[in-house]
């Protein structure tokens, strides 16, 4: 992707040089050519093409922050790691283990 961007800038730079060296060309015309044919369109294309990478980086950063926050919460509550026996790692015993009776299903 960057190779194409560099090549496009080279082409537009050569167009600007040709504009400046032409008998009726000006340096202002060369600068406008470089800006309007090279820098602005290339910046727009690179911004659009780079959007998925920015989203991925933002999502990774947010997940890392959530993981760090969860680790802080576990450390604050004295839990080093989630226990393997409890899928939600809530730290509470299931209702049946607390002495509550299991619900009985009535037949119709």
Image (cartoon, rainbow, N blue to C red):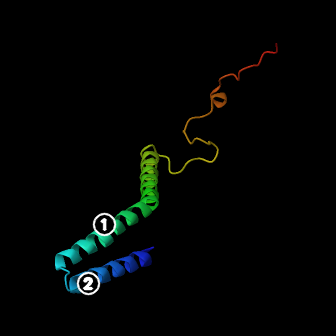
Q: Look at 70% across and 23% down and name the residue there.
A: 102
Q: Nearer the viewer, residue 43 or 75?
A: 43
Q: Look at 71% across and 21% down and name the residue there.
A: 103
Q: Where is residue 24 in the image (x, y as percent from the top left)?
A: 19, 82
Q: Is residue 24 left or right of residue 79?
A: left
Q: Is residue 18 above or below residue 84?
A: below
Foreground mark, 2 or 1?
A: 2
Q: Tag on residue 108?
A: none
Quarter of the image holding residue 1?
bottom left
Q: Residue furthest front?
A: 24
Number of residues whose C-alpha sits closer than 10 Å to that of mark 1, classed few (under 14), some (14–19) or many (20 or more): few
Q: What element carries label 2?
A: helix
Q: What element carries label 1?
A: helix
Q: Tag on residue 40?
A: 1
Are the residues at dot 2 and dot 1 in contact (C-beta closer than 8 Å)?
A: no
Q: Which residue lies furthest to the right in this view?
A: 107
Q: Is residue 66 above or below residue 30?
A: above
Mark found first going from the N terminus, 2 or 1: 2
Q: In this view, does 86 lie to the left or right of 68?
A: right
Q: Where is residue 30 in the image (x, y as percent from the top left)?
A: 23, 77
Q: Where is residue 71 in the image (x, y as percent from the top left)?
A: 45, 50
How many labels were placed on the picture?
2
Q: Position of residue 84 (x, y in %)?
A: 63, 48
Number of residues whose C-alpha sits closer than 10 Å to that of mark 2, classed few (under 14), some (14–19) or many (20 or more): some
Q: Which of 99 and 36 is in front in this view?
A: 36
Q: Tag on residue 17?
A: 2
CA–CA distance in space, label 2 to label 1: 18 Å
């Amino acid at each position: 992707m960057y190779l194409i961007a560099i090549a496009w800038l080279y082409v537009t730079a050569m167009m600007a040089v040709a504009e400046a060296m032409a008998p009726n060309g000006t340096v202002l015309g060369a600068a406008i050519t470089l800006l309007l044919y090279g820098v602005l369109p290339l910046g727009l294309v690179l911004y659009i093409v780079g959007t998925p990478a920015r989203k991925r980086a933002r999502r990774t950063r947010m997940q890392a922050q959530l993981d760090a926050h969860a680790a802080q919460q576990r450390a604050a509550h004295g839990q080093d790691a989630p226990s393997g026996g409890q899928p939600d790692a809530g730290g509470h015993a299931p209702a049946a283990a607390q002495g509550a009776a299991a619900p009985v299903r009535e037949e119709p």
